[in-house]
Image (spheres, grey):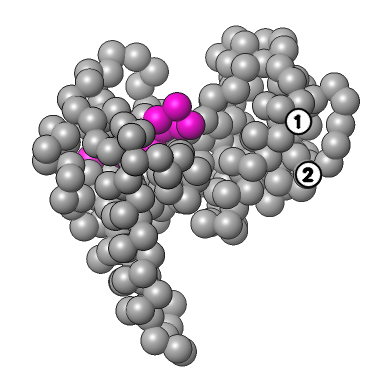
Amino acid sequence: MTNEPSDHAPIRLRDGESRVDLGTYVGRAKRVDPDGDARLVGHGLVLAAYVSPLHGGDLPTVLGLRTYALAQPWDGDVLAPLKALADRLARSVTPPTLAIPPVLSAGVAWAGVSPPRSGWELTGQVPGSVLSAAAAAGIAEMAEGVPDGAGAAAVARLRSDVWSRPADWSTDAGVDVPDGAAFAAETLGFLSGDDDTQVHVYRRGRWTRLSTPLGHVLVRRSLLA
């Protein structure tokens, strides 16, 4: 993955609804990380779209993943700016395609690590409402803990303290993950707000995956600060 001009063919999504959904997902990721990127990986007729709401510095590296059905196979693996993708997905096109931005991203550490695609072991589950509450508490702590005029270093320290903290619920689910996983699930729209929704928790090696019908959050323990 480089920042050289892209020569990849456009991605042909299965239908317009999928294209709108991808635009919503990219938009949510962009609100959390305005200068961030998305990694788009094709596996035959499936597109895997990875983003990282938390990464860099002393933050844990937390990935978001949604998958989309394609109308025709696409075998690309590209890293593109969220801004460029959001701009393209805001346009109405027929058939429902996504043109790869002409200039791609490079040097993004989180995009160089690929989560496993199979071999996951279910270790437990947690109510979605518990993750929503953890995310809300962390967001409130961030809002209250950053005084007006605080410098970037102070904000970065607080973000690391809040989102690197071990999640209270994770031990019962058989894993050890930071509260940043709940932040990712909430801000990327993976939690429906339904108290009955269960988030399934999986492990494989150093990876933990939180899965709902709306998407997946992945954390690799060796990358935690």
Image point (68%, 51%), residue name: 83
Q: Nearer the viewer, residue 183 or 154?
A: 183
Quadrant of the rendering where the C terminus is positioned? bottom left
Give the magenta part as a residue range.
212-221
**First along the sequence among labels 2 and 1:** 2
CA distance separating discs 2 and 1: 10 Å
Inspect this view and state whether residue 26 appears: yes
Describe residue 141's horizontal placement relative to residue 216 as left or right: left
Q: Is 215 a magenta residue?
A: yes
Image point (59%, 41%), residue name: 25
Measured from the top left, where is residue 108 in percent x and y?
49, 46
Mark 1 Cα shell of 10 Å, populated few (<14), some (14-19), many (≥20): some
Task: Identify the disc placed on residue 90.
Answer: 2
Inspect this view and state whether residue 1 appears: no
Mark 2 Cα shell of 10 Å, populated few (<14), some (14-19), many (≥20): few
Q: Name the residue under label 1.
A: 98
